[in-house]
Image (tube, grey):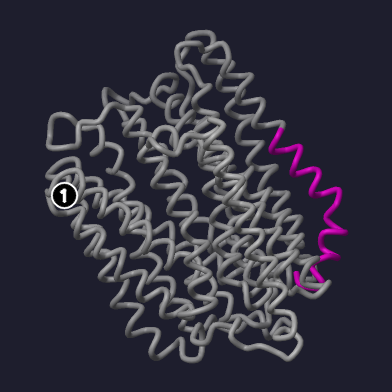
Amino acid sequence: MTAELSQKHPRGLYVLFFAEMWERFSYYGMRAILLLFLIDQVNGGMGLNASEGAAIYGLYTASVYLLTLPGGWMADNILGQKKAIWYGGIIIMIGHIILAIPGGTSIFFVGLATVALGTGLLKPNISSIVGELYPEGGARRDAAFSIFYMGINLGSVLGITIVGYLGQKINWHMGFGAAAVGMLLGLIVFRYGSQKYLQGLGDVPPSKIETAETIAKSGSDRKMGYGLVALLVVFLATLQLTGTIDMTTAQGLAQGAGVIIVSVSAFYFLFILVAGGLTPEEKKRVLVLIVFFLAAALFWSGFEQAGSSLQIFAERHTQRTFGGWEMPSSWFQNFNGTFILIFAPVMASLWIFLSSKGLNPSTPVKFALGLILLGVGFFVMELAAKVAVTGELTSPIFLTLTYLFHTIGELCLSPVGLSSYTKLAPKRYVSQLMGIWFVAASLGNLIAGLFAGNFDENNVQQMPALFNQVTLFSIGFGLLLLVFWKPVKKWMGGIS
């Protein structure tokens, strides 16, 4: 075991690392200036009001993650993962090029939709191939996903810095064009690197390899699947007709996105369990993935407060002046990416070291630690809010510590979650279930936005109670996972 863990990572991991880095450069870079462009009324932006701009922004970020579901299906059933990544990257680049053209509102929305479609096709499948590089599983695979995760965050930091500067300081469309260049670099890395270091991976959709048993069951399973899809359509149509959601406007669709995301996720898991042709062992593993899905959605609902309630707190209630120089409040958000780059290799090495000693925590325990650390971070913010209610500006140490706890929690949960979904998912559904993992992030983002809507910066007195809510929910669910980690691990069928 020790000799196995000490092996170097395959070079294919670094091909995927840099391809994902440049894709995230384009995504996070463009996302950093998107809302600013939508509401800008002075420097050539679209001039929308804040509510319309935020609705479109929220709809875009939610749709990107929702589209990972059909993107995963396309890879599993038609293209294979490598072709899905390649074509997805091309579509993303074309979308950014369209956004770089000052062609009016219609052209802009076409570009935005194109980027979302391409991201949905690429995002779940590149993670799936990382998993394929490590068929033996174990701590080495978890370590690989931690390294891969560094690529995501390095791309994020570079994209926000470069695209954000070009968009805000020079020209919005130049920023969008820089995102296209980043995606082009990612395509070049993937094209030439995959030919040499990813041979035999992500080529044949596993769902096409059928046994006599699966062929016999496919007819009835397909009919049941069609029935569930029809039921979902009827359910959403009923919500629309009764006025529960309004899918005719951007704001209405954004407000109803939570219902849609939860419905799609629930129906998809039901489809997999009922009509997916799974063995009893595979069904238990899918149930574990549902538990991880709920934990991830809860984690992201707190973690993504970075751009909402924590941003408000940084702007209005944190001491940011040092020797006459005022630090921009948005710079606090860079702490997460910086801490990721510092601690990701440390955490990757820690999992391997603990595994060599037989002490590596199981995946449910790592998820529990991530949620508990998230709660600890919000406990720090609760203490900070109690200072703020006195009218004093709080020390920046509070936010710094919160981002540190959240980052360590993210490293316990997110890369391990990526790894576990590739390990536990039935092979013929691996990319689709990777899509579901990203849908959890979409749901978490939406919950974060709804929470921030209750964060009235003019009523400082409610802040400690609001932060306390997140603390209790996060730590509570984390402790619940710790209590039941053994049966959850048992359902995993020996996969750690």
Residue at 13% in and 53% down: 101
Q: Is mark 1 on a helix, strand or loop?
A: helix
- Residue at point 52% right, 48% down? 442
Amino acid type of the residue tagged 1 in the rendering: His
Expressed as whole percent of the image width and height from the top left, the position of residue 309 reads 49, 28
Using the image, determine if residue 366 lies above or below residue 53: below
Q: In which quarter of the image is residue 153?
A: bottom left
Position above or below: 454 against 411: above
Q: Is the magenta stretch mostly helix, strand or loop?
A: helix
Please state the extent of the stretch shown in magenta in the rendering.
473-496
Would residue 483 be found to the left or right of residue 222 on screen? right
Residue occupying image coordinates x 33% and y 82%:
191
Question: Which of these two is toward me, 173 or 220?
Answer: 220
Percent position of residue 445, x then y: 51, 42
- Give yes or no for residue 249 being in the magenta stretch: no
Q: Which of 293 and 375 is in front in this view?
A: 293
Residue under label 1: 173
- Residue 331 horizontal side relative to residue 33, left or right: right
The front one of 106 and 369 is 106
